[in-house]
Image (tube, rainbow, N blue to C red):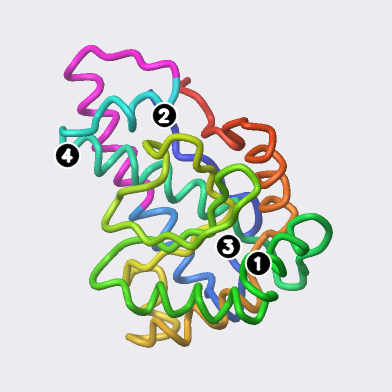
Amino acid sequence: MFELPNLPYAHNALEPVISEATMHLHHGKHHKRYFDVMNQMLQEAGAKPASLEEVVRGAVGQAKLFNNSAQAWNHTFFWECMSPPGQKVAGDLAAAIDRDFGGVDQLKAQFVAKGVGHFGSGWVWLAAKGDALSIVDTHDGVNLLTEAGVVPLLVADLWEHAYYLDHKNDREGFLKAWFDALPNWTFAQAQYDAARKGEAGWTHPGPV
């Protein structure tokens, strides 16, 4: 079965954009619940998957298992996509952002607009296919694991539980503050390197 991974930083490390209270609720309650439901379903089915990616890809068409396994994956990836405030994009990824979006400010504007324009719950991703960058939004638990050759670099959570305690219903304000302070550009660069090599990039911790 799969265990809820620990956060890669303290619960208060992302303040003031995301509060300690939100992180305890989001990680310790919402994220844990996806693991609990998924593990119960896998146990009842007698399944022993080798990876969470295998579960997600194999669950397409099985709504309950797909939603819970994909959300388990999405959230762990989301934690990795953030770091305490202060990182700046640089190097090859910065050059690609200049080429494909016209700079970081334009990337932010398009990223925020895509997230604000998404109706309901979901995710907004910065992704790469080869060396080409794009912004993609997905609904509910859907992620990019089933998109051949597409590697996610960063993701922001659009579900209200991700921001409501701190930003109320101001999704735009949350996404702007998030983009300015929290992206883990070192992680995004590693993902971009993987995409250009035709590799999958980050994988979720395996079963225990």
Image position of 74 with respect to 15: above or below: above
Q: Secondary structure at mark 3?
A: loop
Residue highlighted by disc 2: 52
Badge 3: how crowded within 10 Å, few (<14), some, or many (20+)?
Answer: some
Residue highlighted by disc 3: 11
Residue highlighted by disc 1: 13
Whether tag 1 and tag 3 are in contact, CB under 8 A, the answer is: yes
Q: Nearer the viewer, mark 1 or mark 4?
A: 4
Q: Amino acid at mark 4?
A: Lys
**Upstream in the sequence, badge 1 or badge 4?**
1
Whether tag 3 and tag 4 are in contact, CB under 8 A, the answer is: no
Image position of 135 with respect to 117: above or below: above
User: What is the spatial separation of the Cα atoms under label 1 and label 3, in whole angstroms?
Assistant: 6 Å
**Upstream in the sequence, badge 1 or badge 2?**
1
Q: Residue at x 33, y 26 (%)?
A: 55
Front-lying residue, 79 or 90: 90
